[in-house]
Amino acid sequence: METAPGVAWRGVLLLGITSVLWLGCETRAPSEPADLGVTRQPAFSTVTCGAFGQPPCNPNWAGVWNWCDRGLVVIGSTCQNAPEPLSPEYRRWRPDVTSFSESQTARALSLQRKLGGSQPFNHVAWLGAHNSYNTAQESQGSGLAGWQHSFSLTDMLRMGIRFIDLDVHADATSHIQVCHTLSKMACPIGSRPLAYALREIRDWLVANPSEFVFIYVQPEWVDSRTQEVALIFYNELTEEFLSRLELNQLRGDTSSRFPSVNRLRAYGRQVLIYGAHIPMPGSGWPSGEALSVDLHGSWPWWTDNGQSSIKNFWTSTEARQACEWKVLDPTSGWANTYQPLPPHPTDDRFYSFSGDSSQEPVFWSASPEHVRRAQECNVSVGLDPVGQSGFGPSRDFQELMTASLWSWDTGQPDNWQEEDCAELRSNGRWNDVRCDSQKRFACRNLNTPLDWQLSATAGTWSQNTDRCPSGYVFSVPRDGAQNAALTRALAASGQTSVWLAYNDRLTEGEWRGLVEFWNYTPSFRANALKLEEPGDAHNGVWNDNHLFVPEADAYHWKWSWSGPIQGMRCTLVNEPGDMAQGYSPWYDNHLCVPSSSPVHFTWSYQGPVAGKTCVRFLEGGDPTWNDNYLCYRDF
């Protein structure tokens, strides 16, 4: 079977007469050891023709023969990407997006998303598409006008869009489709069935198993169709969606309200559905379980102070670090005054804006400047349009994508002359440089993510151990707000550049941060692995310490206070001088990694180990822990 870029195929296995189980080709990320979710039931999909790699429908749901889904045509005996000379706007994937996805800018954006993957997902400015379904393909042969994006869902995902906006419509008798029309009404003839839009998203996810997508659903169906809508979502995203109970159990408690995307991926899920209440279809599910997550109620987000949606976003020119937004009052229209937006979201809030011609008379779409400023405040952006539009101005998609890049400078990283360590320059952008240069180090406050300082002394990148002042740790910004804060600290210091805790010394192109020891309970879990010893006698000081693990490794590492973990490679973490009732409780504590991990630790309770990167385990409430270090070679 012929396959296409960015798309994978799932086969079917017939079970009895009526059920079909869809089998993914991808390898799932390892699950957490606890069984957090309920076993998914086999799914039966109505999409058996017309999707990529499938035979065309004869006829389809509208009575059309030899029918393929949007952007696909019959080639041979199956539905494939539409070829030339058909207009690029009508194709599932376009050459210009392929060219961009292979560019240095796209690579830098991918590295930036990986950095954000370790943060609570509301602390990251995700790029989305407003009315994502409303593409140029909707007008192909259907007579529909007013399309908002010239790119397909597949191409928007390929270029870096990570939240999808779907308006789902159905009256009492019509098909369940995605379109832009009056609430609770049937879509115009020729609109796309919801099932095919979800299938397109799933095809891309299967081909990109490390990625995660947010789907915002605007419920425009009548209540009597809710179970049908739920069944379509379940059938097409059976293995991908993260259910309500799973997310609540992953967050653990209210202090970890928003987990990181890395944590959600480590559990094996790729989609979070929110906006509408979509229950699990049928019966037999636990009480409170649902396909979608209630982010408007128990998870308040997407709003300003609980009154209205952020429909547009501005930043004052006098103080760029102060984030402000304009409030939409449903009764009186746009307010004449600005209100302050915290420059870093709280753990129970998520901020977003989208250009919307029906709400904002000043300008129609998100400009590159809006996108850039939004990154500094961790405000997600719903782009409108992405590319050209059928009834509005055109935005160059590469210009918008480039505007969202707050980290690497133009053309970086380029590994010129074996450059394996990252620096921040005075323009607020990053560069890779030789690790033997002399610079000061970027230090982040352990308790305040936007409080950054430079170390008092300079050194080569490898000389980073214990360079930061008390309460700070050598680190790298993981979102646009942190990067803006560090840039201000660099300007105040009078230096022109500063080391970042970010390198690709082990494998070229695989950039990673450093392990960090936190002697407190963070306000979010992110990639923090809890370290505890219940038998420690020092007033329970060893019950709130955490190890921050860079990039996607956190949930493959484990901590044990009762001996090595079978099947893993473990390192003893001890302090013989820490005595309780005549013996040390630290005789059986281990930090364990998978046996195949490239990480190899050395533990020392007599100072750092020469020639290795070391992180200090400093617990202020325990005086015997003053020279303990976890050391490793770069990974």
Image (tube, grey):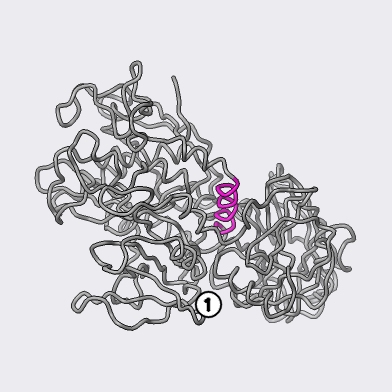
- Observer-nearest of 296 and 463: 463
Q: Position of residue 498 (x, y in %)?
A: 73, 68
Question: At x 80% / y 68%, what residue is drawn?
Answer: 439
Q: Secondary structure at mark 1?
A: loop
Q: Does residue 316 lie above or below 261 as drawn?
A: below
The extreme front residue here reads 393
Question: At x 20% / y 28%, what residue is drawn?
Answer: 60
User: Label 1: which residue?
Assistant: 321
Judge whether residue 317 is colored magenta.
Answer: no
Question: At x 31% / y 22%, what residue is drawn?
Answer: 74
Q: Locate residue 69 relative to residue 418 in the image: left or right.
A: left
The extreme left residue here reads 173
For label 1, the crowd category at 10 Å Cα-Cα, with few meaning under 14, some 14 to 19 and many 20 or more, is some
Q: Position of residue 380 (x, y in %)?
A: 43, 63
Q: Does residue 484 lie above or below 86 as drawn?
A: below
Q: Amino acid at mark 1?
A: Gln
The extreme top residue here reads 76
Residue stretch rendered in magenta on the structure:
104-117
